[in-house]
Image (cartoon, rainbow, N blue to C red):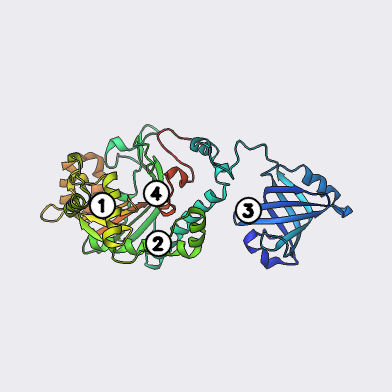
Amino acid sequence: MEKVYVNNLSNYIDKEIVFSGFVDVVRDKKWVQFIILRDSTGKVQVTVEKSDEGNASMVDLVSSLTHDSVIKVIGKVVNNEAVKLGGIEILPSNIEIISKAEELPFDYNNLDGVNIDTRLDYRWLDIRNEKNMLVRQIESCLTEGMRKYLYENNFTEIHSPKLIGAASESGSEVFEVKYFDRKAYLAQSPQFYKQMAIAAGLDKVFEVGPVYRAENSNTNRHATEFTGFDLEFAHIDSYEDVMSLEEDLLIAGLTLVKERYGEKIKEVFNTEVIVPTKPFPRIDLKDLYKELHELYNYEIPETDIGDTNAETEKLVYKLAQEKYNSEFMFITGYAATKRPFYHMRNEKGELQGYDLIWRGTEITSGAQREHRYEELLKNANEKGLGEDVKFYLQFFKYGCPAHGGFGIGLDRLTMLLLGLSTIKETEFIFRGPNRLEP
């Protein structure tokens, strides 16, 4: 028989089905037994009448069930208005234990007081929590919405290698691995390969895949491995084209999330999914410093001049809300010395890129890329990267269109969307300086 899920049980009224799920609750009454089973889409009641002699073996089996065991039920789906779970129950003709669960190390339905590291040690149990399961489904929906937008706009999805032969941007931030008789590195991003695709003539590309950062950082928003959503597209006139596309992309993703999960997010996470409108407010970095000083008496530390920091980003969110009634703000005018060598600079040496701040946190660094070989070579040499990026520079020797792009960390985006306190809550399996398991 076809496997049936909770969310489509109503299509099988008065029909016999096969249903498999986790045992959520067992209620063993005098005349009847109730099993509440759950799958990834919801919960359903299975009712076993003790008075029916034909149910004797099932009654004994149900009496031995442990919480979170997995069972398979063959039975009839019926309407019953007295059942709180959607007015539907299953009357079984056979129950089989697929996997018997041992006693759980903690109650995942009540995580108050359970240390986050303990939860991560048993992440597969932690995700059984309804809220945590919902996080996974919402991130998937957000990804679906953004992917759909790109497919509809003729982007090609690519899959670039994560093992590379040279330290891509700076050796201090990459993981070195043994590759047979030589060294290799885990890619910091698909940046170089996105641009190779542009040089190949693909015009519009994107990738959703793992990104590795060898940064010994233990903040709430950093991880040593995360899922990046990266794109690049050709024949642009300026980085304004890149900003415009990012606006459309985020609007598409957030619109789908709001349609599918908006009410549930409000109920479970007590936060609103706000779909922004174009254009997002924009501000030059020098003007931002001035505004933050005048409005909030804030001075950027000397070491951060030409850039922003975490405190600045929080104030940017405040400014965006108070002055522009927006959750988003683009910042332009960063110092070229603070950005990668492949970001384009204009004839005045000004960086042609931006950061996007959402809810007090940077979610994107985007730019028009430098597509001229001689300029790229000069910029790379300035940063002392000559040999490390020699393979990359080859992409631009044989003609390459003007192009730009950006990358978004999906796990950070989901954390901000749901108002969660740490990226550990949103990554499927978290990787940080002190965690390599499970």
- Dot 2 falls on a residue whose secondary structure is loop
Q: Which mark is residue 395?
A: 1
Q: Which one is in front in this view, the residue at disc 4 or the one at disc 2?
A: 2
* Residue lying at 48% horizontally and 56% vertically, measured from the top left: 138
Label 1, label 3: how many angstroms apart (C-alpha)? 49 Å
Position in image of residue 40 (x %, y %): 59, 54
The answer to whether the residues at label 2 and label 3 have Cβ atoms under 8 Å apart is no
The answer to whether the residues at label 4 and label 3 have Cβ atoms under 8 Å apart is no
Label 2, label 3: how many angstroms apart (C-alpha)? 29 Å
Residue to which mark 4 is pinned: 412
Residue to which mark 3 is pinned: 39
- Asked whether residue 413 appears in the rendered view, the answer is yes
Label 4, label 3: how many angstroms apart (C-alpha)? 27 Å
Q: Is residue 6 above or below residue 438?
A: below
Q: Amino acid at mark 1?
A: Phe
Label 4, label 2: how many angstroms apart (C-alpha)? 17 Å
Rate crowding at label 2 as few (under 14), some (14 to 19) or many (20 or more) other CA atoms within 10 Å.
some
